[in-house]
Image: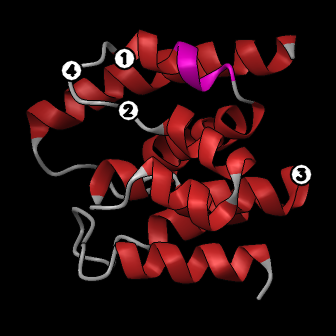
Amino acid sequence: MNLFTKALVFAAHAHDGQLSDDGTPYILHPIAVAEMVMAKHGEEAAAVALLHDTVEDTDVSVQWVTGVFGERIGDAVRCITHTPGEPYMDYLERVATNHLALVVKLMDVYHNHFIRPPVADPKRRARLDAKYPAAIDFLEGRLSSN
């Protein structure tokens, strides 16, 4: 099984039963982000995109991801996982230390901000609408300096 397929099966299993705010299967978000990074950044970046929310949103651990996919993918997933209570800018700084995590997080934020249906809760939507443009500016700046 190639890396992309292996990550797709792993992520689909991890996110099984989860739904996005609009009621669609959650796995469609990681798949969309993977499609966004595949052509320019390759299969490893697409695998990280498929796995990018598994540790944060399921019972999967970074150690499990590393055991299945190796150090390079495991480290990228570790970097892209936002830990509870961690200040958002500290999180983005960590993301920017890993090229795979950086390109995936940038496309994740693009997808969340520009493509996915808006979050229904007005307060949450306002918070995200303020957060995402700053995140995009920061991540694009870090990507251009790499």
- Give the alpha-carbon distance from disc 2 to disc 4, as whole Å: 9 Å
Q: Is residue 64 found left or right of 73 in the rendered image?
A: left
- Give the alpha-carbon distance from disc 4 to disc 3, as whole Å: 33 Å
Local secondary structure at mark 4: loop
Magenta stretch: includes residue 42: no
Residue plotted at (64% across, 54% down): 48
Q: Position of residue 67 (x, y in %)?
A: 58, 61
- Residue that label 1 marks: 88
Q: Which residues are magenta?
A: 93-97
Characterize the local packing of mark 2: few (<14), some (14-19) or many (20 or more) Cα atoms within 10 angstroms: many
- Give the alpha-carbon distance from disc 3 to disc 1, as whole Å: 27 Å
Q: Is residue 143 found left or right of 11 in the rendered image?
A: right
Q: Position of residue 112 (x, y in %)?
A: 44, 47
Q: Going by the picture, which residue comes out furthest to the bottom?
A: 1
- Whether the residues at callouts 3 and 1 have beta carbons within 8 Å, the answer is no
- Give the alpha-carbon distance from disc 2 to disc 3, as whole Å: 25 Å
- Above or below 117: residue 56: above
Q: Position of residue 60 (x, y in %)?
A: 36, 61
Does residue 33 appear anywhere in the picture? no
- Residue that label 2 marks: 82
Residue plotted at (10% across, 31% down): 123
Local secondary structure at mark 2: loop
- Residue that label 4 marks: 85
Magenta stretch: includes residue 94: yes
Q: Position of residue 15 (x, y in %)?
A: 34, 73
- Looking at marks 3 and 1 on the same chain, the residue that comes earlier in the sequence is marked by 3
- Looking at marks 1 and 2 on the same chain, the residue that comes earlier in the sequence is marked by 2
Q: Is residue 28 found left or right of 6 in the rendered image?
A: left
Local secondary structure at mark 1: helix
Query: Label for residue 40?
Result: 3
